[in-house]
Amino acid sequence: MNNLLRYLQSLTDLSPGDWALMHPVLTPVAFKKGAHLLREGEVCNALFYIDRGYCRSYYLKDGLEKNTAFYFENDIATNIQSFGTGEPSAYNLVAGEPLQVIAFDKQGLARAAQQSAGIEALGRKCIRLFASRQEEQANLFQLYTAGERYAWLEQHQPEMLQRVSLSQLASYLGVARETLSRIRKRRM
Amino acid sequence: MNNLLRYLQSLTDLSPGDWALMHPVLTPVAFKKGAHLLREGEVCNALFYIDRGYCRSYYLKDGLEKNTAFYFENDIATNIQSFGTGEPSAYNLVAGEPLQVIAFDKQGLARAAQQSAGIEALGRKCIRLFASRQEEQANLFQLYTAGERYAWLEQHQPEMLQRVSLSQLASYLGVARETLSRIRKRRM
DNA sequence: ATCAACCTGTGACGATCGTCACGAAACAGC
DNA sequence: GCTGTTTCGTGACGATCGTCACAGGTTGAT
């Protein structure tokens, strides 16, 4: 909970009253490696603050897993589309390591936002952050080749390259695992 | 203005009072083909509702234009990152046809949102729409090959293939113009 | 300690793509 | 209508990537 409090305070000036309002909405949950936070077809009714470990989102395409994002400590993981509209999720969310998260209940969060302008502002800031991250993600794939994407990760997310296996990373970067192996070889 | 009113009403229940509040914030502007709505390095201080024509966003990479998006009638074009934070834009926005837009002034819009909860809600809906679109865009490039992306456009944006030249489209899809020409050839 | 399951590196080969080059077609300005 | 400019299709060729195959290394459970 301490990590979460610090994270929220880094986003906005959170008053003690707002924090008290948030508290009953929060539920710590643990997942084993490989356990699903969200499955394709389910409706996403929570935000997951990641306290320890990481998870990844993937689509199933032609029976194969295709990773689209990784979420680490101090990230919020969710399907914003399903969470916002109530439609079933088109992809999966699964733990890549033993995982400890703090779940924000959707209905409880909506109630808390109605009661406090501070929490409502926090929600808006989260959406804008998410939109900004999606834009960055889209640009990463529109502007750069797989090798340039790998270099970008080296600079901006070096920890990720240590914690995520080559195969999972290759699936995310959009190349065969053999190709990523050769990209790594070239840079030494 | 009539198109814009219909568009806003399709997003939310806009009261006549809110529409009157919006009115002084709006400025119709015309651009010739090739004229810039926003240049790299400038700060984006407006949203552009597209009334007629289309525009495209592009990055300069190694001296070449790399398209990242197209905006048509009834779209809102802007740099959400620059608009939100006040930082200089990393890309350009340029008219692809003779263009008529209605510009939303940033400061005026902020004032109007403070005066009306309805306009504030409209703004939140716009951000969520934008985030959703960015996610779709990111998935389009993470999950699909260039040929599959072209097929996706055929189904979801067929008008775009008629109005945008092959070269501009190839730049957007991430392949050489010769390759797109051959992709088209294969489908006949 | 042992064994199975998984992950990583590497070679070979065919398919696809980017680049360069050229000619035809479409278009705009006069 | 003519002309210069831009766009589009296509061939050739080298580079890169995906696929298949296999070997060595790591991990984790019994």
Image (spheres, coloured by chain):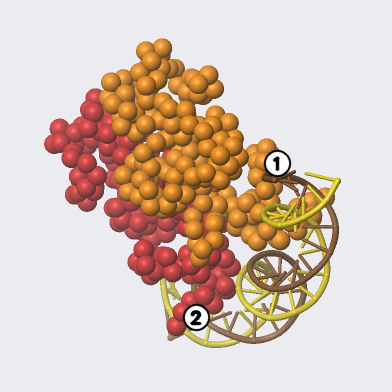
Chain colours: A red, B orange, C brown, D yellow
Residue D11 screen position, x and y as percent: 83, 70
Which residue is at 47% across, 64% downward? A149
Q: Is residue A124 left or right of residue C24?
A: left
- Amino acid residing under circle 2: Lys
Where C1 falls versus A176 (above or below)?
below
Please name whichever residue, B21 or A84, is drawn nearer the observer in this view of the structure: B21
The picture places residue B94, in percent across and down from the top left corner, at 52, 45
Quadrant in the rendering for residue B20:
top left
Identify which amino acid the numbered label 1 is placed on: Gln
Check residue A185 in the rendering and tell me which mark sits there, or answer none.
Answer: 2
- Disc number for residue B175: none
From the image, tell me which residue sits under label 1. B162
Question: Is residue B111 among what the camera can see?
Answer: yes
Q: Chain of mark 1?
A: B
- C24 or A165: nearer the eye? C24
Q: Position of residue B7 (x, y in %)?
A: 51, 24
Q: Is residue A151 above or below residue A138?
A: below
* Number of the front mark, 2 or 1: 1
